[in-house]
Amino acid sequence: MSHEFPLDGIRVLDASQGIAGPSAGMMLARYGADVIKVEPKDGDWSRTITAGKEGMTAMSLANNVGKRSIALDLKHPEGSALVRKLAERADVFIENFRTGVMERLGFAYKQVAEYNPKVVYASVTGFGQQGPMQSQPATDAILQAFTGMMSINRGKQDNIPHRLECWPIDITSGLFTFQAIAMALYARRDTGRGRYIDASLLAGASGLQTVRMIEHVITGGAPA
């Protein structure tokens, strides 16, 4: 362990796509972790949005710098066997499939923890693992609307709610996920146990807007 790369020696299996999950894995890599990104055969969808060429885009570069990558079909027996080998030796496992998908594939936390009880396992979904919206897909734009962020970002000329184009909720959710993983690794040094982390874009959006939410309660929803 060093001050420059405190996560040197930590192995991360990053099976997430897009922004929130991958950005958490990227930050782990920047602090020295060995991050292996598992992509589907046609690649992480972030390779198809924003400017870029030859399968690399600004989005994919920003959220995956410092990682190694392998393309696998998790439904294929050989692909599943390779992920099992990686999961057996992983300190951290990150995924952002819809609820229930990883269990069907054989890589939910309870399944991985049976042979790797020290793993810190983070699931990143839109609305979390519980509640009536747990299986609903989500994007940064959807959560900006759902949580009221757009309502406090009205245009000065048209007074219409607008979304921010810098993916604030995805990035904030990635930061919170990274923070939770780092703290779980810190705690594991004393306990020797892994942990399950239920991260979500809804939690990230709420954390980003805590002041406005408290203000909304205090004022009874009255506009500023």
Image (spheres, rainbow, N blue to C red):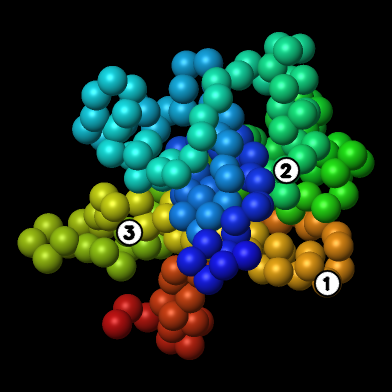
- At horizontal 32% and vertical 63% (from top left) the residue drawn is 151
Q: Quadrant of the C terminus?
A: bottom left
Using a 10 Å C-alpha cutoff, classify the residue at mark 2 as few (fewer than 14 neighbours), some (14 to 19) or many (20 or more).
many
Q: Quadrant of the N terminus?
A: bottom right
Q: Is residue 109 above or below residue 31?
A: above
Instruction: Say which residue label 1 marks.
Output: 190
Image disc number at residue 90: 2
Q: Earlier in the sequence, mark 2 or mark 3?
A: 2
Which of labels 2 and 3 is toward the front?
2
Q: Nearer the viewer, residue 173 or 184?
A: 184
Q: Residue furthest right?
A: 114
Q: Nearer the viewer, residue 37 or 172?
A: 37
Using a 10 Å C-alpha cutoff, classify the residue at mark 1 as few (fewer than 14 neighbours), some (14 to 19) or many (20 or more).
few
Label 1 to label 3: alpha-carbon separation:
43 Å
Residue 94: image location, x then y, percent: 64, 44
Residue 160: image location, x then y, percent: 21, 57
- At horizontal 12% and vertical 58% (from top left) the residue drawn is 158
